[in-house]
Each structure stands twice: as C-alpha cells, then as structure tokens.
Amino acid sequence: MNLLYFFFRDLISNNPPPQNPILLLIRNRRLFRLTLSIAVALGIASLSIDNGQGSTPSALHKVSVAMFIVLTVLQAFQTAVLARNYYAGTSCFPSRIHARY
C-alpha cells in the first residue's frame, strides 16, 4: 500500500513543481518511457540488421547504449534529489508517513 503512495505522490501532493529543468523533464513519464522505448528499438534494430559489414548496426548500438546511460544517470539524479529532500524535511510526503518509519 505504501509503495503505491510513493508512485502516485505527484498526483496528491500540494507542493509546486520543481524549478530545476532537469527534474521537470524527468517527471514527464511519457517522455521518459518514449525515450526508453526508442532506446530499446534501436538496440533491437542494431541486432537484427547486423550482417557483419557496415557501420550502421554499430552506430545504432552505440546510440542505444548512450541513451540507456543518460536515462540511468537522470534517474540516479532524481533519486539523489528525492533522498536529499526527504532527509532535509522538505519532502512532498505527509508527516504521517514519516512517523511510521
């Protein structure tokens, strides 16, 4: 039950959206999922057209890996910001959740 609360905290939070443009982009779940889907599609395409000659499959694979790395770094940044806000007391979670842990 608490896990669902953390996923839907943005919908029930009264806090203003973050001022950091990176956090605004990360919070856009559709954009994140679209980028993730494109990275997967590029990875699959690089494997399916790999004929041993040509640089296109290699380039597609490199772009796919780069996209995954960027998405991973962005998620790590979001996690660090959330943890910092949580421990600083400026978290968007109500105090009743803090009291249980």
Image (tube, rainbow, N blue to C red):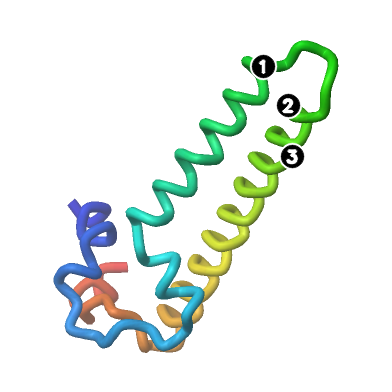
Residue at the image point whose x is 56% and y is 63% from the top? 74
Residue type at mark 2 is: Pro
Look at label 1 and name its amino acid: Ile
Residue pointed to by mark 1: 49
In the image, what residue occupies the spot 23% across and 71% down? 97
Q: Where is residue 17 shown, x and y percent of the image?
A: 31, 82
Q: Which residue is mark 3?
A: 62
Residue at the image point whose x is 59% and y is 24% from the top? 45
Q: Earlier in the sequence, mark 2 or mark 3?
A: 2
Badge 1 marks a residue whose secondary structure is loop
Please identify the quarter of the rendering in which residue 100 is found.
bottom left
Where is 22 relative to 52, above or below? below
- Residue 57 is labelled as 2
Q: Is residue 41 left or right of residue 95?
A: right
Identify the residue at the far right of this view.
53
Q: Residues within 10 Å of mark 1 (few under 14, many from 20)?
A: some
Residue 85 found in image quarter: bottom left
In which quarter of the view is residue 50 placed? top right
x and y percentages locating residue 61 in the rendered image: 70, 33
Amino acid tagged 3: Lys
The mark total stands at: 3
Task: Give yes or no for contact between labels 1 and 2 (Cβ–Cβ under 8 Å).
Answer: yes
Q: Position of residue 22 (x, y in %)?
A: 50, 74
